[in-house]
């Protein structure tokens, strides 16, 4: 028998054990999945929240303002909207990243696709924004702000949460 053929010949019991060991070793531990979700949601959520909060304020002020002369106050509104977007981004980021990471890693293989995870993150973010609006005294400007903010933060965090690798830890 040639040397190459001897190396490739493995008994069925050894081959089955190695496949089982490979499946266990390829799957990261549960705590690493949770840490990846917390890192992505806790770091990326406020960053995206600040950025999109600034632009969502522009849209909210443009839809609410009837005089169309509020250009001077727009800079202050955008600054404050960006600052409000930081804690809201943290809230929405963590609310989206943790369940989405755990579902994609343990239950639903479809969510491993970044586009599907982005769509699911948008929906989860929108639901979180809706829950915030229900418990808040809202105006038309705040509805525009929260819908834009929660949907974008949820989508970005959802897509990146699925892409992130536990090997980074």
Image (cartoon, rainbow, N blue to C red):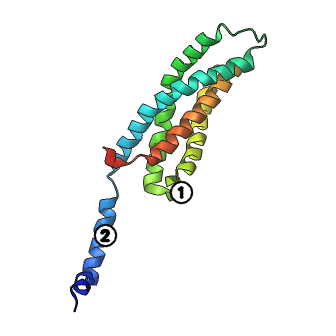
Against 21, residue 111 (above or below) is: above
Q: Percent position (x, y) of residue 150?
A: 58, 32
Q: Which residue is mark 2?
A: 20
In the picture, measured across the screen, residue 160 lies left or right of residue 166, that is: right
In the picture, measured across the screen, residue 3 lies left or right of residue 135, that is: left
Q: Which residue is mark 1?
A: 110
Q: Percent position (x, y) of residue 16?
A: 30, 76
Q: Percent position (x, y) of residue 138?
A: 66, 20
Q: Nearer the viewer, residue 28 or 99?
A: 28
Residue pictured at 42% horizontal, 32% vertical: 42
Answer whether labels 2 and 1 touch (C-beta < 8 Å).
Answer: no
Against 112, residue 42 (above or below) is: above
Against 72, residue 24 (above or below) is: below
Between discs 2 and 1, the one toward the N terminus: 2
Q: Is residue 51 visible?
A: yes
Q: CA distance from mark 2 to mark 1?
A: 23 Å
In the rendered view of the protein, which quadrant contains the C terminus? top left
In the rendered view of the protein, which quadrant contains the N terminus? bottom left
Q: Residues within 10 Å of mark 1 (few under 14, many from 20)?
A: few
For mark 2, give the secondary structure. helix
For mark 1, give the secondary structure. helix
Q: Residues within 10 Å of mark 2 (few under 14, many from 20)?
A: few
Q: Is residue 128 visible?
A: no
Q: Nearer the viewer, residue 142 or 86?
A: 86
Question: Which labelled disc corresponds to residue 40?
Answer: none
Residue pictured at 52% horizontal, 53% vertical: 111
Q: Percent position (x, y) of residue 5?
A: 26, 86
Against 100, residue 55 (above or below) is: above
């Amino acid at each position: 028998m040639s040397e190459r053929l001897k190396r490739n010949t493995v008994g069925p019991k050894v081959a089955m054990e190695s496949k089982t060991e490979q499946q266990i070793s390829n799957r990261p531990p549960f705590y690493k999945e949770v840490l990846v979700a917390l890192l992505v949601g806790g770091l990326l959520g406020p960053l995206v929240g600040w950025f999109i909060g600034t632009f969502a304020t522009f849209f909210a002020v443009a839809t609410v303002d009837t005089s169309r002369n509020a250009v001077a106050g727009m800079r202050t509104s955008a600054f404050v909207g960006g600052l409000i977007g930081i804690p809201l981004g943290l809230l929405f980021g963590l609310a989206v990243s943790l369940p989405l990471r755990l579902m994609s890693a343990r239950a639903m293989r479809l969510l491993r696709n970044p586009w599907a995870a982005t769509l699911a993150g948008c929906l989860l973010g929108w639901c979180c924004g809706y829950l915030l609006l229900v418990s808040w005294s809202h105006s038309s400007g705040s509805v525009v702000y929260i819908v834009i903010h929660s949907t974008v933060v949820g989508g970005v965090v959802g897509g990146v949460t699925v892409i992130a690798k536990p090997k980074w830890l």
